Image (cartoon, helix red, strand yellow):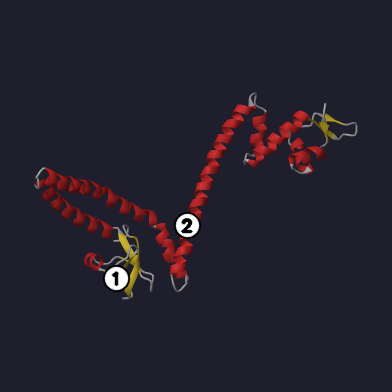
């Protein structure tokens, strides 16, 4: 029967001798035998258990948890459940870290396009990132509301062409006009703009915002605080009165 010293077990498991001794002192893995001089001797089964312990430690389980698992009548089944739970936890952590990386990348890209560099600029970009999800929800709601209007338009055109029924298209014109008014008011009620000069977050009047020259993320406005006129960055403004 093979027997291993403390040093041999440590070497095969990639841990230190002090770790092997510590596990013995804590009763996590007690050696099967001792020499006449009191040196620890581990069996092949002990070595197998040590490798399992090391593996479980690498998954993030605590020593107390591992000790309890090894005392179970069917440790394999319990360990399997723990590993599944640990896998879910780690997947959640990976998702959180991935989201943080995406936020860092967005911040870096935002700073590249913002000049001059300043702490106020960082604050502006951070606010935009923080409100991005809320602003995306506004855009999503508008698209969902527009879908039935678009379907009615298609139906109205097809019925007019193939059936000569024109009134469906006329109904669509009225509904489209109502939707356009609602969508515009809903959009500007839930958006605000950040002045690149004084970094004030403000809401322009509906008329000014509606008629202003704009890009997908900016709009040429006059800041309500400092009076600067230029392209201001869009952000969520539903909580601003």
Q: Is residue 29 above or below residue 215?
A: above
Q: Is residue 153 above or below residue 224?
A: above
Residue 178 appears left or right of 237: left
Q: Nearer the viewer, residue 214 or 79?
A: 214
The local secondary structure at tag 2 comes to helix
Q: Position of residue 54 (x, y in %)?
A: 69, 38
Q: Nearer the viewer, residue 155 or 49?
A: 155
Q: Position of residue 225 (x, y in %)?
A: 32, 73
Task: Look at 23% across and 67% down and name the residue there.
Answer: 211
Report if the CB atoms under discs 2 and 1 are less than 8 Å apart: no
Q: Nearer the viewer, residue 171 or 116?
A: 171
- Quarter in which the N terminus is drawn: top right
Q: Which residue is mark 2?
A: 103
- Quarter in which the C terminus is drawn: bottom left
Q: Nearer the viewer, residue 132 or 70?
A: 132
Q: Which residue is mark 1?
A: 221
Task: Look at 78% across and 41% down and name the residue there.
Answer: 11
Q: Is residue 226 above or below residue 65?
A: below
């Amino acid at each position: 029967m093979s027997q291993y010293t403390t040093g041999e077990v440590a070497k095969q498991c990639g841990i230190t001798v002090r770790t092997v001794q510590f596990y013995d002192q804590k009763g996590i893995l007690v050696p099967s035998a001792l020499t006449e001089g009191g040196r620890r001797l581990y069996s092949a089964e002990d070595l197998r258990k040590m490798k399992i312990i090391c593996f479980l430690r690498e998954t993030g389980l605590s020593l107390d948890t591992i000790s309890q698992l090894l005392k179970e009548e069917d440790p394999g089944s319990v360990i399997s459940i723990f590993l599944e739970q640990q896998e879910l936890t780690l997947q959640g952590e990976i998702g959180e870290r991935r989201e943080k990386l995406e936020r860092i990348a967005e911040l870096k890209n935002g700073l590249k396009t913002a000049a001059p560099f300043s702490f106020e600029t960082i604050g502006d970009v951070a606010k935009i990132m923080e409100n991005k999800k809320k602003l995306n929800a506004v855009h999503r709601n508008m698209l969902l509301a527009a879908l039935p209007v678009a379907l009615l338009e298609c139906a109205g055109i097809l019925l007019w062409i193939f059936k000569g029924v024109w009134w469906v298209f006329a109904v669509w014109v009225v509904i489209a006009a109502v939707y356009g008014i609602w969508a515009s008011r809903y959009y500007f009620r839930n958006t605000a703009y950040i002045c690149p000069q004084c970094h004030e977050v403000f809401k322009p009047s509906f008329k000014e915002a509606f008629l202003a020259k704009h890009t997908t993320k900016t709009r040429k406005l006059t800041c309500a605080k400092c009076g600067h006129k230029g392209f201001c960055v869009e952000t969520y403004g539903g909580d601003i009165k």
